[in-house]
């Protein structure tokens, strides 16, 4: 019974926002920075990866291939430094849902190809990963992480928390002046 | 959960919009300065680039290289005189969605050269757009001065028997 309440306490702690939430936020942010930077170095091959999914119209591929890496990089940076954390986590969750949908549609079509998740052909860097059910599971884990950050009410070790602390301190000081 | 910290607030949506706009601007700037960036071009501009006007001489070179010639004029005009081997696809019939039009030439790997009576007839341009709408993504060539220029240069013409020419 005591054990059960301990687990519940730990879950509530993560959901409210504790050190584990901070770790999830920084790890996922770093992952987005890594992924976005790799894609920015080689937009052409990322465009080809996007085209392989055969979901977006051809005309939209260059726009998507320009936006997604920049978005990943920006979301990663804001999550790591802790600025507009909930909004960043919200967009990252939507992005992850889109990735999961695109991969699942192609799995149903019976197609397997390089997912283009963490890759830069021009740098010869990245992990070679093919579209598979495991990829869906992994992205669902990432999605859960972003939802936890989105739901959390407190973000320790974040710029917005720091700014809020300064603001509250100043309020206290000026209160009796 | 208190109202101030509800899951989706106006402030959250506003911040999300700011992030999306910033990322969009970042994407465009990165793409502009990137040595391997995309050439971002709108659909109408790209399609306009894929319809190229050429002279009868250039058309002759393509003719000799096995290009498919499409006559965009009416059936009667085509029967009276046309470039040998040309396929007749009247632009007006395509515009009016008439049945029985043969578009099998689109499957051929050869280049497409369209012609009508000249720059003022407009049928070639109309047909070129209709062909693009059917999913043809390669360049379409139009003989700017049409069949009169082709004829004036002494290039081959098939005439209706008994036409007197």
Image: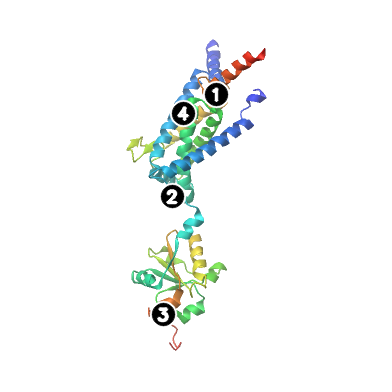
Q: Which residue occupies 45% across, 32% down?
A: A32
* Residue B30 in picture, x, y percent from top left: 44, 41
Q: Circle 4 sits on which residue?
A: A29
Screen quadrant of the N terminus of chain B? top right
Question: What whole-number distance in Å separates the C-alpha atoms at marks 2 and 4?
Answer: 30 Å
**Res A120 → quadrant:** top left
Query: In the rendered image of this protein, does residue B112 appear above or below residue A71?
Result: below
Question: What whole-number distance in Å separates the C-alpha atoms at marks 3 and 1?
Answer: 77 Å
Instruction: Inspect this view and state whether residue A45 appears.
Output: yes
Same-subunit check for callouts 2 and 3: yes
Query: In the drawing, what numbered circle is on residue B152?
Result: 3
Query: In the rendered image of this protein, does residue A148 appear above or below residue A8?
Result: below
Q: The disc numbered 3 marks a residue on which chain?
A: B
Residue occupying the far top of the picture: A2
Comes first in the chain, label 4 or label 1? 4
Same-subunit check for callouts 3 and 4: no
* Residue A26 in picture, x, y percent from top left: 46, 25
Screen quadrant of the C terminus of chain B? bottom left
Q: Secondary structure at mark 1?
A: helix
Question: What whole-number distance in Å separates the C-alpha atoms at marks 4 and 1?
Answer: 15 Å
């Amino acid at each position: 019974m005591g054990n059960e309440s301990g687990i519940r306490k730990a879950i509530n702690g993560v959901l409210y926002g504790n050190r584990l939430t901070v770790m999830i936020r920084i790890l996922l942010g770093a992952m987005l920075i890594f992924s976005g930077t790799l894609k920015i170095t080689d937009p052409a091959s990322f465009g080809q990866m996007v085209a392989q999914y055969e979901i977006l119209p051809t005309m939209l591929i260059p726009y998507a291939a320009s936006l997604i890496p920049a978005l990943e990089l920006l979301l990663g940076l804001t999550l790591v430094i802790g600025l507009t954390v909930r909004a960043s986590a919200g967009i990252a969750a939507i992005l992850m849902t889109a990735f999961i949908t695109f991969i699942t549609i192609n799995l149903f079509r019976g197609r397997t190809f390089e997912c283009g998740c963490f890759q830069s052909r021009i740098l010869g860097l990245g992990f070679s990963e093919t579209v598979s059910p495991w990829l869906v599971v992994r992205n669902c884990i990432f999605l859960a992480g972003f939802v936890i950050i989105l739901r959390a009410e407190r973000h320790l070790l974040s710029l917005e928390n720091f700014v809020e602390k300064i603001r509250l301190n100043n309020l206290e000081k000026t209160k009796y002046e | 959960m208190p109202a101030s910290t509800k899951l989706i607030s106006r402030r959250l949506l506003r911040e999300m919009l700011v992030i999306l706009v910033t990322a969009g601007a970042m994407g465009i700037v990165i793409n502009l300065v990137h040595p391997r960036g995309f050439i971002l071009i709108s659909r109408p501009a790209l399609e306009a680039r894929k319809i190229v006007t050429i002279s009868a001489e250039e058309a002759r070179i393509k003719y000799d290289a096995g290009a498919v010639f499409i006559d965009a004029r009416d059936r009667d005009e085509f029967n009276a005189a046309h470039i040998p081997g040309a396929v007749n696809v009247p632009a007006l019939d395509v515009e009016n969605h008439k049945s029985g039009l043969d578009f099998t030439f689109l499957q051929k790997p050869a280049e497409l050269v369209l012609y009508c009576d000249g720059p003022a007839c407009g049928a070639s341009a109309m047909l070129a757009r209709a062909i693009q709408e059917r999913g043809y993504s390669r360049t379409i060539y139009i003989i700017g001065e049409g069949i009169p220029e082709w004829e004036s240069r002494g290039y081959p013409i098939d005439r209706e028997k008994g036409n007197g020419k």
